[in-house]
Amino acid sequence: MSGIWRCVDAYEWVELPNTLGMVMHADGGYLGSKPYAASGKYIQRMSDYCGACRYKVSSAEEDNSCPFNSLYWHFIQRHRGRFGKHPRMGMVYKAWERMAPARRRAILQRAEALLDDIENL
């Protein structure tokens, strides 16, 4: 079987579950045990989308910081009850806890402001 046909054949049983189940965590964790949420730093490392971006990828709480950073931490905090004790998420929650309380509040406030005005990003 040629390569193209293997890709087409795999679409229904590989691509759809990976896209919907793991990336969107839409299956409630059945296929993927943790959500695949990304910060701006991860997006910068793994793609070329950040080259001409107007946002500061090294910040999460400033007005010009990358929206993905504060939205990432907002997601992590919002779903702590679900993922907080998960072994694969431990490092993420430890990093969150090491941040100063004032910084965590500022990050969550930035995320809330972004969500309130999401249409204008």
Image (tube, rainbow, N blue to C red):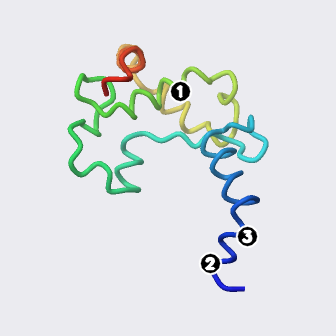
Give the residue drawn at x 74%, y 34%. Answer: 28
Q: From the viewer's perspective, is the residue at label 2 or at label 1 nearer?
A: 2
Give the residue drawn at x 41%, y 25%. Answer: 99
Q: Say what amino acid the circle numbered 3 marks.
A: Asp
Is 77 on the left or on the right of 68, as rendered? right
Q: Which of 106 and 102 is in front in this view?
A: 106
Q: Residues within 10 Å of mark 3 (few under 14, many from 20)?
A: few
Quadrant that contains the C terminus:
top left
**Disc 2 element:** helix
Is 18 on the left or on the right of 67, as rendered? right
> Height in image: 32 above or below 81?
below
For residue 4, the mark is 2
Residue 45: quarter of image: bottom left
Is 75 on the left or on the right of 106, as rendered? right
How far is mark 3 from mark 2, CA to CA? 9 Å
Q: Where is residue 48 in the image (x, y as percent from the top left)?
A: 32, 56
**Of the image marks 2 and 1, the number of the one nearer the N terminus:** 2
Give the residue drawn at x 63%, y 50%. Answer: 19
Q: Position of residue 81 (x, y in %)?
A: 68, 21
Q: Position of residue 82 (x, y in %)?
A: 70, 26
Residue 59: quarter of image: top left
Quadrant that contains the N terminus:
bottom right
Q: Mark 3 points at which residue?
A: 9
Q: Say what amino acid the circle numbered 1 marks.
A: Phe
**Of the image marks 3 and 2, the number of the one nearer the N terminus:** 2
How far is mark 2 from mark 1, CA to CA? 37 Å
Q: Position of residue 51 (x, y in %)?
A: 24, 52
Q: How crowded is mark 1: few (under 14 residues within 10 Å), some or many (20 or more)?
A: some
Residue 23: quarter of image: top right
Q: Mark 1 points at which residue?
A: 75
Q: Say what amino acid the circle numbered 2 marks.
A: Ile
> Height in image: 31 above or below 91?
below
